[in-house]
Each structure stands twice: as structure tokens, then as C-alpha cells.
Amino acid sequence: THNHTHTRTHTSATSIMSTATLAVVVAFAALCAGAPSASESNAGVLRAAAVPTIPLFNSAIEGLTMPAVGLGTGGYNSNPKVGYNGYPECWSQPGGCADFVTRAVKSWIDVGGRRLDCANSYQNQATVGAAIKETAVDRKDLFILSKVGPSHPLGFQDTLDQFEDIKKDMQIDHVDMLLIHWPFQNPSQGNVTKNNTESQDPFCNHSSPEFDNTKCRISTWKAMVKIFNEGGAKAIGVSNYNASCLQEIVDAGLPLPSLTQNPFHIYRSTTQKETIDFCKAHNITFLGYSPLGVPDWHKFPGPRMSPTPLQDPVVQKIASDHKVTPAQVLLQWQWALGIPVNPRSMSQTHMIENLEAYGFTLADDEVQQLSSRPQDYCTDDPKFYECAKQ
């Protein structure tokens, strides 16, 4: 299985590099021929074509692929006074930042971004959906991922109801990927809003004598399978699930997720090994969120770690050697490991950098250096919900 996964990633990366090269050649030929330089929209189309894709298996329609890089849309601030692209970025619709969200989503699609990472708990899906409608890109060319829970209850009917709300909010008739956001309800941390609505499902309702976390997760997953089988989602998966939560689905004899989305960056890499190994053994794609850390909201404790992965001396040295940005080094390192990502940014410059992170390759020893950075354990960083338990 390991060889199969490695070959798949390698082939996928190689075939895309040829696409990227072709895109550059086409653009350059147009310039040499005296034609006007490509408009920004044409540049976006070329950029989109040059982004590698990764195939999805298990609970995914046959032949489905996903762009390696998406745009995260869940911010950690609800105060518009920071301004567009101000830190910490404000992505909250109720907080008054709908205009920022609209601008960011349209910018992402304009410059060539085709995957959007959304969630009902980010409280901005109606704005994201409306912004998509204002772009010239067809729905079929976009990959829209959304998530149910965790500030909304888990449970069978609750999941079906949330999915209907997601479609209505985003003005779409299907999603490309639907995830269970967390393996439990109400973590009330990070960018997830807390609410006290109880589940309709006896296995998920905390006041029910039948409440059982494992049975709740399985009941919720059965609803996801129903949504997938009925064509509501082209693929289904989970998020923040470790190997033991994934094993519950195997033990229940249910169809496996196509994907799990977990934190992954240089300070949270080797600590994800157990989950990644499980995913490789079961053909589940591991998608890394917070690939650059969370630079607008969280600072890692020193002295072993830099405040953000972007400031890490190893990252900066490799970026200098390749004449690329630190962010591009971090994203290319994850792609070398076969891991797709969804960095969040309102900056169009950063969006372009992220999309163009696939135009060079790292040497094996550079990949190894980046895979050997100190890890962010909860003993050092107890208030950060992405920290690794020892």
C-alpha cells in the first residue's frame, strides 16, 4: 500500500509539472509572437491548470480528483476594524466582514484558485456562495468542500438537516466534498462558535441515557453515507479524526472516508504519523490544514520553534536557496509528502504565491530537514487546539 501511495503521488506530481511547464511555454510563446500579454483572467486559467491534483478513493465517485491547494475560509476574528487583509483576518459574516469574504473568494477564483474549504460553523457560507455566483468560472470547475458540526449537533437527522442548510446557504445543489468537522460536538475553540442546541439523535444528545460518543460518530457517518449515495456529495470524509476514530468506521463495516483533514505543518508533522500511516493503509487522503501554522492568530512558543513556520531558519534558508518564498517551501514540502493543503489568506499576492508553489521541487535532504523540525506538544503550547498530545 505504501508503494502504491508513493507511486500515485509521484506520478500525480510529475504529470502536473509537465502541465505547468506547458502553461508557461504557451504564455511565453504568446508574448514572443507579439500578442498582447495574457489578461489576469487568462493568467488565472493557466495558473489553475498548473496546480497538481490528487485522486480520491473510497467514498468518492470514480475518477474524482481534488486540486492540491485550496483556500481556507475560517478566520479567528470578528472585528472588521482590522481592515481587509488585516491581522487577525476577519472572515465573519455576522461580525460585519461579509465584504472582506466576498473580495477574498472572488480574488482566489480570479487568480486561479479552484478549491474552497468551507464550513457551516465559519458563519460565512451564504457570502461565499454569493461571491462564487459573481465569478465567471463554472460551478463544475470548482471544488467546494464543506463540513457539518461541531457548533451544530452531530447525529443522523441533524447531519441531513445541516447539509440541506449548507446547500441553501451556498445556492448549490451538491458539494464536491462533505466532512464531519470534528469527532465530537462543541469544541468551542479556534474559529468554531459554540452553541447549546442538542442533537435529535439519542446517541448524540448529551442528556440522553443512550448518549455514546462512538455510536454518535457512527450514526453521523451513516448520514454522510446516505448523502453520498444520493448524490448530494461527490465525496465524503472527516476532519480532526485520529486513527482510533477512523478505526471505528472500519469496525462498523461501513464505507471508508475518502479524506481526513487534520492540522499539518513543520511543527505538527511527525506527531501525525500514526494517522497518516492509517490513511495510507486504507487509501484515505490526508489533507493538511494550517500548513503555514496560523500566522495571523497563533505564535509558537520558543526557543525550539519560531513564532511561525514562515520564520523558521531552515525554511528561510531553503527559500533563499531556491529563490522562492517561505510559504512556497512549506507547501511544496507538503506536496512532496503527498499532502494537499488549504492555506487561508485574503492577500491576492499570497494567493498567487500559494498557487505557484508547485513550480519547483525540493531535494530529498531538504524534505528530510523540514520533516525533522521540533514538534508542538501540548505540554509547551497548552492553549493551542492543534497541539500534539504526548
Image (tube, rainbow, N blue to C red):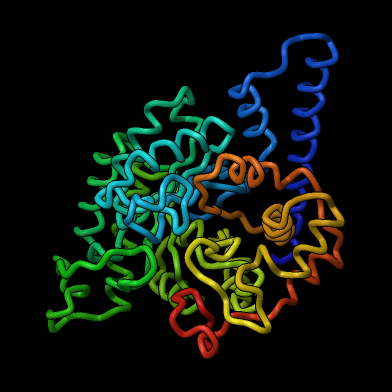
343, above or below 195, in the image: above
Compared with 388, 318 (above or below) is above
Q: Residue at x 47, y 44 (%)?
A: 116
Residue closer to the observer: 59 or 300:
300
In the rendered image, residue 356, in percent from the top left (x then y), is placed at 69, 42
**Can you name the residue that lies furthest to the top here?**
34
- The residue nearer to you, when weighing 106 against 251, is 106
Report the quarter where the N terminus lies: bottom right
The residue sitting at 73% across, 46% down in the picture is: 358
Q: Quadrant of residue 19?
A: top right
Q: Position of residue 188 (x, y in %)?
A: 30, 72
105 vs 259, nearest the viewer: 105
In the shown orientation, is residue 11 left or right of residue 210? right
Could one spot residue 5 in this view of the protein?
A: no
Which residue is pictured at 34% across the width and 43% down the height? 232
Q: Residue 86's spot in the image, x, y percent?
A: 46, 52
In the image, residue 35 sits, relative to residue 135, either above or below, namely: above
Q: Is 26 displayed left or right of 140 in the figure? A: right
Q: Is residue 237 visible?
A: yes
Picture quadrant where residue 98 is located: top left
Q: Is residue 276 left or right of residue 124?
A: right
Who's the residue at 86% across and 67% down the image?
Answer: 365
Figure quadrant of the C terminus: bottom right
Q: Position of residue 259 (x, y in %)?
A: 51, 58
